[in-house]
Image (cartoon, rainbow, N blue to C red):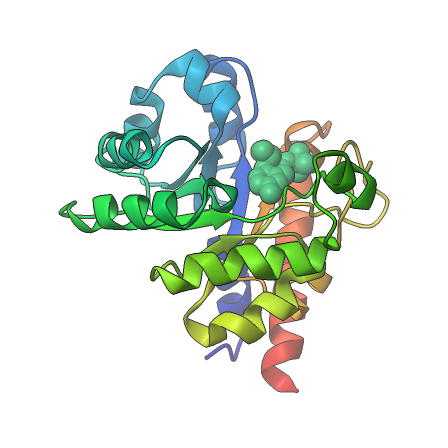
Amino acid sequence: MIRTDAQALEQARDRLIVALDVPTEKAALALVSQLEGQCTWFKVGLELFIAAGPSIVEKLVSLGYSVFLDLKLHDIPNTVAGAVRTAGSLGARMLTIHAGGGPAMLLAAQDAAATLADPPQILAVTVLTSMDQQQLASVGVSHSAPDQVALLARLGLAVGIHGFVCSPQEVARLRGMTGEAGVLVTPGIRPAGAAQGDQQRIATPAEALRLGASYLVVGRPVTGAENPAQTAAAIVHEMSTALLHEART
Ligand code: C5P
């Protein structure tokens, strides 16, 4: 229960995940040290994982951070199951797979995670936040983005996956499907005035929380800022104000 400004700030810092989308371990660790005290989570995505290797996850964990390993696994069930077992033993607390891999792949991933002593939360990526209606149509998806997100989420829920990555624009609908138990992670976060980049389905940090997001993933608005720590602090402040408001209404 949030009662004070300090509690709201602490919870905001625990719900902000900064995406370390940089090309070297050195650059990642420099950002981590600049952002000390601003957040407790970092996301390791493909760019950094390929450059630095699995040890970057272990390094961040040894520094005391929670790691979201965003590998977006999408392959045949047996291959994904193996990757979940190896990636899942690195100490990351969340690991992504693509829901579009289908029910058999989702089940294989969930079963593989269940064999681990300390499994990461499996998050199924629904529709990338960079996909708009036109992009979806071009790959043969005729559903609207929200309907496609709901369809993919149903596949995950059917095999016991309760964590999803979705845009802020679909998070309220997914919250309705998962209830409180759902872990909903939303990229596509843009503080007012920030550049949109390639993201299409976006919202501000406060809006995303109000709509039901559990965690916000923020990359370029922080990593590309002149002063990343100051920008992260402003995002945390916006989040904490939204959390306090929510607690009081
Ligand atoms: O720089 P930006 O804030 O757009 O970064 C968003 C991060 O979230 C990127 O690392 C991207 O890979 C990730 N992501 C996303 N959309 C998804 C899943 C992950 O943008 N559906």
Give coordinates of residue 22: x percent, y percent.
56, 20
Taking the image as shown, residue 158 lies to the left or right of residue 136, namely left
Is residue 5 shown to the viewer in this render? no
Where residue 106 sits: x, y (%)?
Answer: 37, 48
Identified at 57% across, 59% down, the residue is 151
Residue depicted at x 31% and y 44%: 109
- Residue 175 position (above or below residue 50): below
Q: Residue furthest bottom?
A: 249
Could you tell me residue 239's position as x and y percent? 64, 60
Quarter of the image where the N terminus is located = bottom left
Q: Is residue 160 above or below residue 142?
A: below
Quadrant for the C terminus, please: bottom right
Rendered residue at 63%/69% (across/down): 173
Image coordinates for residue 86, horizontal then vertical, percent:
23, 30
Most foreground residue, 78 or 223: 78
Which one is in front, 98 or 185?
Answer: 98
Instruction: Out of 4 and 96, give the one closest to the viewer.
Output: 96
Relative placement, left or right, of 66 versus 32 is: left
Q: Is residue 73 left or right of residue 202?
A: left
Q: Is residue 27 visible?
A: yes
